Every structure is written in structure tokens, then in C-alpha cells.
Amino acid sequence: MAAGGCAGGTADRSATVTSITALDYYTDATEHAQWSRRLADCGRTAGVTVRHSSVPVPAVVPTVLRQGAARTLPDLLMLDNPDVQQIAATGALTPLDRYGIDSSGFFPGISAAGSYRGTVYGLAPTVNTTALFYNKDMLREARVAVPRTWDELKAAAARLTRPGRYGMAVSANATAEGSWQLLPFLWSNGADERRLDSPQAAQALRLWVDLLRSGSMSRSVLNWTQADVHDQFVAGRAAMMVNGPWRIAAMNRTEKLHWGVAPLPVRTAGQTLATPLGGEMWTVPRSGSPARQEKAARVLACLTDDAHMLALARQNFTVPARTRVADRYAAQVPSMAAFVRSARTARSRTGRLGARWPRAATGMYTAIQSALTGEETPRQALRQGQRIATAR
């Protein structure tokens, strides 16, 4: 969709802008080059050259806050979706509706993640979430069906565990990755990040404790990143894992690895699976120049049109952010069907806590560590996690 006119800007003023700046965190050389080409393509549709730069992930928010104070923000800014509300709250971003950008047809969780106080500030071309990967050969050999409930998961993991191999692998480390991986179990069981000390949350954390204590998961999950979990899976040291679609490209290059993917199990049949929404959103900061903002908005509109969504999804094994495009994609790429299905009910991490989400994430991964090391029961650990989440 082409972006319309911006309040305060005119066509002739807009025409004088020949280049704009864009900032993201794709510091990997291959990813940076891919996005440079994509931005250049959309820049041509808007009649501008896009000067693209990247900073490491941990530096994005501090950089943006510093640039906002100095009024040196880029014209086009990519943010991890949980950070959009925090930056919008500072007044650094412009509402996208003023440019006529089409924000209809997106998955509900995506719309929520890009909005602050009912106004859309960010849109994503594609998104991701989590699912259950499994080794087809190992499940067939053990005569194990793909689990759909927690009881089935524990039983399957136990049967798949043997010397040199664990039945299940997750990332339970002391970072937001650990919180991200627990969220689908917590949310699907009716727990809420506003009440980490609820019985439903304790049941979710108890599942992980039971898997570890039974020997179906390695104690090393306390330190594993999602990349480590992937490495264990492709090396045959884990029969099942929780991970995202960004691992598919590497798995497709692994010889003799026959894998499948399914939605994550829920505690009891009939519960609605709710997974966390991952992915980045593009925003238009307040640059002080209505003409530059309008050009940036036209580039953003190009990045989020159907054609670019589909191209990015195919390139990166992500889910197109619009439902109609995602449905078409799932039919074309069967390995992504489980992720498209999960994206329908995926939730924004900031949907209920807004800018206070990072504190809840800290409370969650602190509780995970305490419970899995045996220092506290899941209920005790989550009570402490709730205190961390609500600390002022």
C-alpha cells in the first residue's frame, strides 16, 4: 500500500527529500546486506535513497533514547516488538494513521504490539513464535505419537530419553529467552503475567521441573540459549525441543535429520494455545521534518505490503503478518503451517503490561532458575518473581 500525505507536509516539500536514514539491529553481515537490498528496493518506490545502519541488539533502546533527547533520530526505525510501547511513550514516534498506511488484516497480537494507547506506531512485515520440533525417526523408533497435552509430553519425553539423549530440550536460562520459552505453557494454562504467583502459573513451571527431575531434560537447560537447544537437537542429543522457525534453514541443511513441527502441547485438551509473538516492527520517528517522515512512511508501507511480506517470509522462514498472506504461505510451505496456526492466537508480551513487561520477564526467569535448581518450589519461586515484577 502506498502511504498517503502527512499532516504538515506537502507534495512539493516531500519531493525535495532524496535520501533518508534507517536503523535496525541486523549486525550480521548477511542479514544486514539482505535488509539493505530490501530497504533500497522500497526506497526506490518512494523516490529516495535509504542510508542503512545497524547497532547490536542491546544497544538499540539506549541509542534511540539518546538520539531522541538529542533530536537525531533516524527517519525509519526498527524495534523489537516489546520495545515499541516504551519508545512510543516517550513521544519519539509518529502515529502511522496520519500517513494513510494500511494497518488492516494483521494478526490481532501484531496490532496490539504495535499500538500504544489505541494508536498504531509500528507495523511488522513478518513475525515469529514458538512450536514443538521433533525428530521423526526417534519418535517412530520409540513408537511415540506427537504429544498434544502436558501428560503426553511427559510420557513421550520419558520414553525418548536414553543414554546420550534427552527427550525434551528448552532454553531456561536467566535471560528473557527463558521467559519467552515458558510463556506459552503459562499463558495457555490461563495464567497471566500480571499475576505470576497464580496456581495456573505454578502448574506451568511445575511441568518444567517435572521434566528435569525425571531426567527427561538436561540440567544444562538452565544455561542453554535457544541456539544451544537447536544444537542439541540437530546433534541427536534431544528428541524434541521448543524453538522458533528461524532454526529451519539450518535444519534443512543438516543431512539425515528428519524433523517435524507441531503446535506446543497444552495442559488439557481443549485449552487454547497462546504463544508469544516475536519479530521486529518498523516505525517512523519524529525527525522534525514532515517531508522526511512522509518519505519514511512510504518506505514502511512498501515493507509491509503483501508482496514484501511473502518475500521476507520465504527468505527468513517467518510468518507474514497479515492473515490472508499467512494462509497462502502456509499452503506453500508446509513446515511453517504450525507457526501460522500458532500466530493466530499469539500474544504481544506488552499487551497487558505495556512498558512494564521487562520487569515481569525478569521475575519469570528468576523464578525459573530458582525452581529448576530446587532452591524453591514453583509456587515459592513465582511469588518471588511476582515481587520482582511489581517492584518500584
Image (spheres, rainbow, N blue to C red):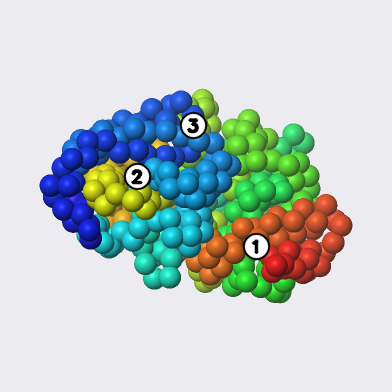
Look at 80% across and 56% down and name the residue there: 370
Pointer 3 with pointer 1, Cβ within 8 A? no
Residue topped by disc 3 = 27
Q: Residues within 10 Å of mark 1 (few under 14, many from 20)?
A: many
Among numbered discs 2 and 3, the one appearing first in the sequence: 3
Q: Are marks 2 and 3 in contact (CB under 8 Å)?
A: no
Q: Position of residue 355 (x, y in %)?
A: 55, 62
Judged from this view, the residue extending furthest toward the right is: 375
Q: Nearer the viewer, mark 2 or mark 1?
A: 2
Q: Residue furthest left?
A: 12
Q: Is residue 18 left or right of residue 22?
A: left
Regarding mark 1 in the picture, which secondary structure is present there?
Answer: helix
Residue identified by numbered label 2:
75
Which circle's residue, 3 or 1, is located before the other in the chain?
A: 3
Q: Which residue is mark 1?
A: 360
Q: Residues within 10 Å of mark 3 (few under 14, many from 20)?
A: some
Q: Please state which of the two labelled residues, at mark 2 or mark 3, is closer to the viewer.
A: 2
